[in-house]
Image (tube, rainbow, N blue to C red):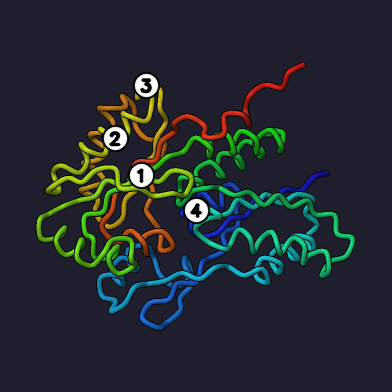
């Protein structure tokens, strides 16, 4: 009988209650704040981290989860008699964590010669609950009797369609992390300029700049409308950080534009918000698959 495990890292931002419900193990990223190292999900809550960012002298930084750490996790699954392990990772172009997981699969052969654990290390090509949600869905469907490989194929198709529209209400953190120049950040904050940023397959791009907080959410909706054929048929998620009011404002406009509520709300965790800052909102939505050829039917 198959014994199936599900594994990810803390950048997935999966709420603990969902992780426990669907049997998903989450390994926390190391986060360094002003010279002190913390482990995400163990040493602070999301709200505590937002405050830590505001008070920090420097830029909070993340370190990759190492191949030795992953190998130790894999060894445990071998020792506990698992037959299959689905490991969905943070975007490979944004962290060496994915490559380290692949190396750990090879290292495991030395540590547990002849082991029978089938490990599938998968690149999410994105961040946060944008992939965490679909890992939960995959695990849920397998729990309910779905065939593992079919559920994984469906999950990867969905992830290949996911795009993100992000807005930061302050450029301070992006200036610190080098994502915008210091001069642009100072001028932007003085003039109330808010960038509308897309995130597609791990690549970020400033799509528009608006002036004033009130213009942010309408601009986000406007950009999403250019990326999909039919808003009414588009599943989406809403992400946010410290402001429930901004979340609620975005929800109100999204519900009107999409014609239905989001699949879920999610908070940006430390591994993600260390780059966006403590004042950000996001819309994640299903557009068209980027790798169309991967889903074309095979010719007879």
Q: Nearer the viewer, mark 2 or mark 3?
A: 2
What is the distance, in whole Å, between disc 1 and disc 3 at their CAs?
19 Å
Question: Residue 122: where, in percent of width, then height?
Answer: 63, 49
Within 10 Å of disc 4 (Cα), the crowding (few <14, some 14-19, many 20+) is: many
Q: Quadrant of the C terminus?
A: top right
- For this view, does 80 lie left or right of residue 197? right
Ranked by sequence position, the earlier of labels 2 and 3 is 2
Verify CB contact (< 8 Å) between mark 1 and mark 2. Answer: yes
Q: Secondary structure at mark 4?
A: helix
* 36 lies above or below 223: below
Circle 3 is placed at which residue position?
230
Q: Secondary structure at mark 3?
A: loop
Ranked by sequence position, the earlier of labels 1 and 2 is 1
Q: Secondary structure at mark 2?
A: helix
Within 10 Å of disc 2 (Cα), the crowding (few <14, some 14-19, many 20+) is: some
Ranked by sequence position, the earlier of labels 4 and 1 is 4
What is the distance, in whole Å, between disc 2 and disc 3 at their CAs?
13 Å
Verify CB contact (< 8 Å) between mark 4 and mark 1. Answer: no
Q: Secondary structure at mark 1?
A: strand
Verify CB contact (< 8 Å) between mark 4 and mark 2. Answer: no
- For this view, does 240 lie left or right of residue 295? left
Ranked by sequence position, the earlier of labels 4 and 2 is 4
What is the distance, in whole Å, between disc 1 and disc 2 at their CAs?
9 Å
Within 10 Å of disc 1 (Cα), the crowding (few <14, some 14-19, many 20+) is: many
Q: Nearer the viewer, mark 4 or mark 3?
A: 3
Q: Residue 12: which disc?
A: 4
Q: Nearer the viewer, mark 4 or mark 2?
A: 2
Circle 1 is placed at which residue position?
198
């Amino acid at each position: 009988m198959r014994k199936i495990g599900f594994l990810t890292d803390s950048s997935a931002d999966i709420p603990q209650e969902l992780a426990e419900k669907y049997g998903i193990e989450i390994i926390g990223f190391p986060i360094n704040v002003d010279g002190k190292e913390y482990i995400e999900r163990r040493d602070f809550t999301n709200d505590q981290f937002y405050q830590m960012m505001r008070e920090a002298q420097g830029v909070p930084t993340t370190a990759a989860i190492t191949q030795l750490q992953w190998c130790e996790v894999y060894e445990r699954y071998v020792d506990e008699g698992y037959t299959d392990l689905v490991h969905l990772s943070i975007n490979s172009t944004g962290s060496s964590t994915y490559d380290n997981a692949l190396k750990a699969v090879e290292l495991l052969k030395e540590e547990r010669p002849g082991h029978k654990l089938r490990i599938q290390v998968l690149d999410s090509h994105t961040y946060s609950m944008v992939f965490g949600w679909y890992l939960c869905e995959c695990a849920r469907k397998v729990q309910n009797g779905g065939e593992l490989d079919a559920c994984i194929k469906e999950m990867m198709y969905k992830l290949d369609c996911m795009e993100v529209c992000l807005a930061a209400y302050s450029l301070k953190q992006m200036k610190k992390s080098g994502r915008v120049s210091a001069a642009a950040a100072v001028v932007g904050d003085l003039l109330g300029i808010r960038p509308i940023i897309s995130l597609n397959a791990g690549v970020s791009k400033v799509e528009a700049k608006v002036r004033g907080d009130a213009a942010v959410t309408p601009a986000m909706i406007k950009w999403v409308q250019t990326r999909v054929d039919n808003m009414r048929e588009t599943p989406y998620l809403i992400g946010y950080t410290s402001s429930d009011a901004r979340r609620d404002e975005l929800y109100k406009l999204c519900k009107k534009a999409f014609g239905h509520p989001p699949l879920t709300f999610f908070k940006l965790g430390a591994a993600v918000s260390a780059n966006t800052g403590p004042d950000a909102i996001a819309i994640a939505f299903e557009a068209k698959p980027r790798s169309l050829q991967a889903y074309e039917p095979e010719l007879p």
